[in-house]
Image (cartoon, rainbow, N blue to C red):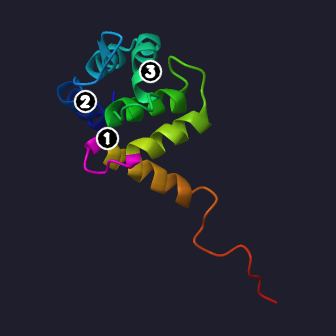
Amino acid sequence: MMPRFRVMVLGAILIAGATVVRGQTTADGVAALARGDYARAAEILRPIAESWRQSDTAAQYFMATLYDSGQGVSADPLRACALYLRASANRENPFGAEADRLVGASIRSPFHSGRSTTSRSI
């Protein structure tokens, strides 16, 4: 596990325990993720992250990473993108800031080279 990811996981466990869905908290989902139990993490995080009644930036970010990687769930880049976008709305939260960075990077690459593709030199 990469050091930056470990710090984010530990941070999520500390700050994300407030959201509860069906007796499970975001911290429970992140703990399952840290143990490598991706299916259990997805089972816990999905209803929290995809809820329209509340917004849990950490749950959105970690569920997006599961959809992005295909660990614990079928890979779904569209759902991953949607959850990264929702998480990025809360840039004051470290997970929102990271999601914002990832969204920005995906918009700039691999298809955007900084040059206009509509103008041609004659």
Q: Quadrant of the N terminus?
A: top left
Marks 1 and 2: in contact by CB < 8 Å? yes
Could you tell me what secondary structure mostly forms the magenta stretch?
loop
Question: Mark 1 belongs to which amino acid?
Answer: Phe
Image coordinates of residue 77 in percent, x first then y, are 60, 36
Q: Residue furthest left?
A: 14
The residue nearer to you, when weighing 100 against 2, is 100
Q: Secondary structure at mark 1?
A: helix
Q: Residue visible at 34% across and 18% down?
A: 29
**The quadrant where residue 86 appears:** top left
Above or below — where is 3 with respect to 34?
A: below
Q: Counting other residues with Cα less than 10 Å from the Cα at mark 3, is it few (<14), some (14-19), or many (20 or more)?
A: some
Q: Residue furthest front?
A: 53
Q: Residue furthest bottom?
A: 122
Q: Is residue 91 magenta?
A: yes
Q: Residue visible at 47% across and 46% down?
A: 85
- In the rendering, which numbered label is found on residue 95? 1
- In the rendering, which numbered label is found on residue 47? 3
Image coordinates of residue 114 in percent, x first then y, are 57, 72
Q: Residue visible at 36% across and 29% down?
A: 59
For marks 3 and 2 on the same chain, the one whose residue lies earlier in the sequence: 2
For marks 2 and 1 on the same chain, the one whose residue lies earlier in the sequence: 2
Estimate the spatial distance between the alpha carbons at disc 3 and disc 1, rounded to whole Å. 18 Å
Residue highlighted by disc 2:
12
Q: How many marks?
A: 3
Image coordinates of residue 69 in percent, x first then y, are 52, 29
Q: Residue visible at 55% across and 24% down?
A: 70
Q: Secondary structure at mark 2?
A: helix
The residue nearer to you, when weighing 19 against 103, is 19
Magenta-highlighted residues? 88-94
